Amino acid sequence: MVGMLGFFGKKNGEISFDQVLKDLCYTGDEVLDTYHDEQLKIGLAQHPTFFEEQPVDLEDDLKLWVWGTSFGYFQSDSYVNRAQISGDSSGLDCFKQAYDRYGSDFIQHVNGDYCGVLYDNSQNKIQLFTNRLASRPIFYLSTDRAIYFSSSIQPLISINDEEVTLSDDFLAEYLILRRVLGEKTPIDEISKVPPASSLTYDPTSGVNISNYWMPKYAYSEQSKDELCERFLDILTDNMNTLVGSYDKLGVLLSGGSDSRLIASLIDEPELYHMTYWKESTETQTAKKIARHLDTELTILETDEGYYERALEENPKMMDFMGLFTQGHASLFDQVYKDDVDVMITAQFMDTFFKGYVYPEKKLKCHIITTYRFRIIKVPLRLMKLWTY
């Protein structure tokens, strides 16, 4: 697990910032990088593979931190790919060049998978921002003295001495949908920066959120075949951008159409499949896909106590996305750790296109009536299987 943690203003209590930052580390291989002055303290936990030294000095009193990366930026009539900037450039170079060209509006032009922090020391303010889809979340908790922010919910509870409360409404929404829609969370005091938005905080004005982009419907008269071809071209280009610089790629393969599509777009991937029963239909389908791709398939078989052991580790990564019992393949990381640079967990995405991997969950609720107890069953579909 990796991510970002920080606060701006007067911190409450004596809880160690560095200790809470270490909670963002899961494997122990993460690289920690911190910065602090009189107003701001911020830390990043990064994978060694993706490590980039931060902050980026955009100007003398303007510093930038990014969790994630950029693939390029949009100009008025063209697109600048990351590799076009300076050959084998980092994603941070894209932010710097976009800022040099567009100034304070640079975020709306940057394409990538990221969230970030912009610190203006001269104006005594901080800005938290997300990309167009908020694909990497940034949560925040504001008090009358400071704002705390993190890529994960639990560190915000740990680092802030003030009590937090569970929201009955949003906790119920999470239990039914496996997530909370919008910018709220099951914790009343903690919210999430919306997609394509920036949150500005200063001690005088407090929190102000503005949106910088909205999707626009683009009518098309293309046929289904033409749209499928366009979809494949876009997906292929994006896969090349995402994974093109890594030598050894792994794919956690299911029997679904989505994971086989992803595996087919990668040149000589290492294929893995997690299962609780080797003779299951999905496992046999995964084997057929691997044979078709002429690639060996490594089976990751769970035992009866697997999820009980996983529950000792997974809850600390829980952000109310999916079930706390998920993070399915987390205990197998030592199996593939030395064999791949990046693992694409395509096995748990089946609801993106079709079907359900695991049996439908049911919740039994006891409802009190005048004369008796009545038991009802409420189906809880697996609406999102990606935990992190």
Image (spheres, helix red, strand yellow):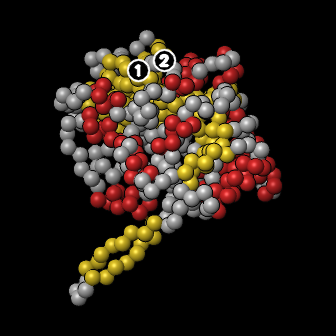
Task: Report whether 121 appears left or right of 46.
Answer: left
Rendering coords of residue 321 (x, y %):
44, 50
Residue at the top extreme, as displayed: 60
Seen at 38% across and 60% down, the residue is 175
Residue at the bottom extreme, as displayed: 371
The quarter of the displayed image where residue 162 is located: top left
Rendering coords of residue 165 (x, y %):
24, 50
Viewer-closest of 374 and 250: 250
Viewer-closest of 259 and 223: 259
Tell how many labels: 2
**Amino acid tagged 1:** Asp
Q: Which residue is mark 1?
A: 33
Q: Is residue 113 visible?
A: no
Rendering coords of residue 19 (x, y %):
29, 28
Viewer-closest of 64 and 213: 64
Inter-mark Cα distance, 2 to 1: 8 Å
Q: Are marks 2 and 1 in contact (CB under 8 Å)?
A: yes
Under circle 1, the secondary element is strand
Seen at 57% across and 62% down, the residue is 356
Seen at 20% across and 43% down, the residue is 163
* Mark identifier at residue 53: 2
**Amino acid tagged 2:** Glu
Neighbor class of circle 1 (other Cα within 10 Å; few <14, some 14-19, many 20+) is some
Rendering coords of residue 268 (x, y %):
73, 37
Relative to residue 32, is residue 142 depicted above or below? Answer: below
> Mark 2 or mark 1: which comes first in sequence?
1
